[in-house]
Amino acid sequence: MMIDPLSVFLLLLGASTPILFAALGELVVERAGVLNLGVEGMMITGALAGFGAAYSTGNPFLGFLVAACAGAAISMLFAALTQVFLANQVASGLALTLFGLGLAAMLGKPFEGVRAPSMPAGPLRINWIVWLGLVMVPLVWWFLNRTRSGLILRAVGENHEAAHALGYNIRLTRLAAIAFGGAMAGVGGAFISIATVLQWTEGMTAGAGWIALAIVVFSNWTAPGVLAGAWLFGGVTVLQLRLQAAGVAVPVQLLSMAPYLATIIVLVAISARQKFSRRAGTGAPGSLGTNFHALR
Amino acid sequence: MIQLVPRQNASNLWQIATPLLAVLATMIAGGLLFATMGHNPVAAIRTIFWDPLFGMASGYSRPQLLVKAAPLILIASGLAIGFRAGIWNIGAEGQYIMGAITGAAVALALYPLEAWWLFPAMVAAGLAGGWAWGMIPALLRNWFGASEILVSLMLVYVAQRIAAWMAFGPMRNPQGMGFPGSRNLQQYPSASNPELIAGTGAHWGVVAAAFAVLATWFLMSRHIRGFHIRAAGTAPRAARFAGVRPAVLVAFCLGLSGALAGAAGLFEVAGPAGQITDRIGVGYGFTAIIVAFLGRLHPVGILLAGLLLALTYIGGELAQLTMGLPAASVQVFQGMLLFFLLGFDLLTRYQIRRRITA
Amino acid sequence: MTKGTDLAVPTVFRAEGIGKSYPGVRANDDISFAVRPGEIHALLGENGAGKSTLVKMIYGLVRPDEGRMFLLDAPHAPQDPRAARAAGVAMVFQHFSLFDALTVAENIALGMENPPPRRELAARITQVSHDFGLPLNPARRVVTLSAGERQRVEIIRCLLQNPRLLIMDEPTSVLTPQEAELLFATLRKLAAQGTAILYISHKLEEIRAHCDRATILRHGRVVESCDPRAHSARDLAAMMVGGQMRQIDRSGRQAGEVLLEVQGLSLPAPDAEGTALKDIALTLRAGEILGIGGVAGNGQEELLAALSGEVASRPGTVTLEGADLSGKGPEPRRVAGLLAAPEDRLGHAAVPDFSLIENTLLTAGARKGLVRRGLIDHGAARDYALAVIRDFDVRTPGPHVAARALSGGNLQKFVIGREVMQAPRVLVVNQPTWGVDAGAAAAVRQSLLDLARQGAGVIVISQDLDELLELSDRFCALNEGRLSPPVPTEGLTLDRIGLMLGGAHGMEEARI
């Protein structure tokens, strides 16, 4: 069986894009000290909203814009719960995922069985949104490491008590980060419905949001690491699909486990490295997952 | 200006009041949602919450209440123990599926043997299957520090694909004329999990759920291990100081919740579902998370919350039939419920005061 | 001696009638005082006297309910710390407001309003830090710095702002005596340039030696404003506490047979911020109190964890009355008679959300029969909680109250009482009076002495050298995970102890 490396790489780019967007967004959220387990819910919301807008207007780019807005909007439910009502972040993220999956399934009925408008290809015949995702990697890196706002965001995530003592607004910083994460997850979800599957089906994100969360751990909370993780995941997915198409004597159901098993293996490997290598340590933000309440 | 002041002791009154408030708020918000979709909100809420119990079709739907509540309560009882300890098993759906598969495997391997011990052996296999699936994230966390949240969740997708593979491959009914799905265990007397008292819906799973409620209540309020679990959840260092070994706790909580979810899967596949199909997982494992929180992680609360969410399942189906509400509206409803609950929970931990300005 | 403010002299900062209330607490009440240019002004008071609330208001973290503040005779009412910084106020926090994962330069940039570009900032940090004899490498990550170096980062962060008023909240609590001397030399230099320094502390000798003026707070009110050099430490203590200090009774103890023997105890650091224990050896006799001194972060927590059983060690390293406990966890050690009370009351020694009754179950289950065959006897736990509350004078509405609701001193009395009343053979305590008011501290110290008098061995790990000199028979220093051989406490001077604690380690470069 011959596999042309270039075409595999192009497929890999496509397969990794939804995860890349969602994981880059979640990276920023986690660097601000917030663990949002609602990525799956925000992605599916973006997938539906984007598809609906693209189908209704015939403009796929408008679809992505709407998806970003929808993702950011639904992320505000999580933001309200955790930043205003000080609810547990793990539980609130789960709630967002469960709610998002249900809401999309309910509102998505009218869009079942119709096709997305086709997208014009970008430079090198690669989708414009794939390009956008690739550009976002250095952009997020630059923002986090080279801008004043990025420094404040990292400070808030690292030690919210100290950031508060220096006079930075923890809540506002985190709200902004959560909204960005929602918008990115929305675009990632919309890429699945508008650019990959070309139609809307219930539960179509199929765990991509959860994989994105694992990729953030894999990246050790860095933007280049997220790209590497997304490509690794994309590679496994493409390989698995290629093997299916080639008719390998392994049941389809077992082959389709590959991305999930790969995610577990990668997660275990990277966690072990962070645990056992004293030098490496973990890049996890110090205040990750904890709420902040100041008595004035 | 409104100010939040932390309470020194969590308020007992609000502990009980917030779930009720959350249900009320969900009814109102859900009604509004249905109204925007062009349905009569009052009728919709009535169809979901009232008609299954007292409406025209209640003769059919009332027994369904126990059928749906049993797996929810069984799973949530186990999950709540882990949540108390800060150990997040969100892959109960996968453990449920694996319990169903391993339990059914015993029966399918021995078909058509009839023996009194067959069903107990299936229960044991179901418990073991769920336990083993829950132990994977436990061991990966203990050995390598991998997040049990992500691993247990990933394993749901893996379990779903194993179920599909089973239904299309190894477990496919040889007399099924090529259709996917295993033999129907309801038609296999020694392996079936029948209704114990006609018209109630009560099967062995209901008995097990009741037992789980009692046992977890005893564990959490009378036994030192339950005390250690609660301590570990709120102050992990204090728990270590008391002598708790975190790795043991992780294995205990994930193993126990996995086993209970596996048992729930077995009771389902041997009873109401009847056979292994690629759709054996119907979301009980996820809904049970809501049940655990709505029940305030307390066994009695979980019992009530399980019954309530079972009601929304049945009512949702009814509303789908009679009013044409989309099937997913139940899911939306359950999600909303969790949102409101988490939001109102603020009231148990903080007092709201108006700031006095000088 | 003058009270209140003298308006004839120019002031850098002035407070007039400041008041602040929290639910159930009057934190500050009608506070007036003034700080003059070039003055090191001490703010002296017990824990809970309202010092922290007061400086948080000056720094814009908390807003006063009533009263007015003036900075350089202009009204001072900062909305947030950034406004305060812009007005010329800088602050070094007691628990550093630093970000471990970030570099020195990033940490400093976060404390400035308009930091210069990266390279320029790095150059300025290098220069200013050398000018003040506090050299710093701007590219290093804070997590790799010692406590003294971390404080330097905070100080440089303040200096780059050219503050008119510099607030320092208990800055020497993490320093050796020699490091503290270096700090004061820096402060003198600053004061000479006209910066006013507001210096918060409860260390009386330090204030008498270095401060020009002292404002003493008690229960949220100013009780005295004076020249500390004109008063004895005993007088200052009396003003701070409002009455005479209770005298400690050290009598009636004699060293008996060896109870606890620790040999060759080495353990790796538990995490990146932790300290490795290196070849620790000690013996403890019945009736004896062994004091272990050291600057924070030199292995105190790790040593307590190794003795309490939270961390197991190689066989033969921890022996109690001939029984090897090295591999045993906390429960078997308690059964054998080796008990411990960690430093952190909320979250380590006690579960904050649990009632006092439930908190007895944390350690007293076996020795007091509160737990039998895994079953909890709630009645017995309640009785034991009541007994501890009664015998140790724990002020609480009742045993059902959550641990977090108690004041630091009362919770500490409960924690120590819970262990002492189990009649341990050996009790190990870490920072037994940290953040505790004088009355409770005296009660805790006395209970440790009484326990030793009854024939138990006690190990006191503390950063409070006065406390160790007061309590212990022999003294060891813990420095970077190594324990010095013991010396008798009698005749030991603070200077000698300072050298044992590693002198001004980490500050050497500064003196070259």
Image (spheres, coloured by chain):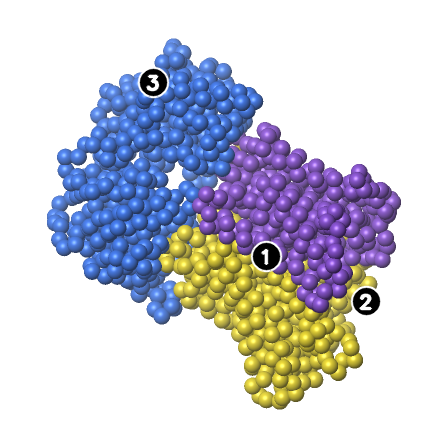
How far from the left and from the top, in percent, is residue C410? 33, 46
- What residue lies at 66% left-to-right and 47% top-to-bottom? A231
Q: Colour of chain C?
A: blue
| Direction front: furthest residue | A2
- What residue lies at 55% left-to-right and 77% top-to-bottom? B124
What element does badge 3 sit on?
Answer: helix
Tag 1: residue type? Ile
Q: Tell me which chain the residue with mark 2 is part of.
A: B
What element does badge 2 sit on?
Answer: helix
- The picture quadrant where one finds residue C5 is top left
Q: Is residue C508 above or below residue A284?
A: above
Q: Which residue is mark 2?
A: B322
Q: Is residue B213 above or below residue C227?
A: below
Please tell me the numbered disc located at residue A264: 1
Q: Nearer the viewer, residue B16 or C160?
A: C160
Local crowd size for mark 2, using a 10 Å CA cut-off: few (<14), some (14–19), many (≥20): few
Chain represented in yellow: B
Please tell me the numbered disc located at residue C188: 3
- The label nearer to you, 3 versus 1, is 1
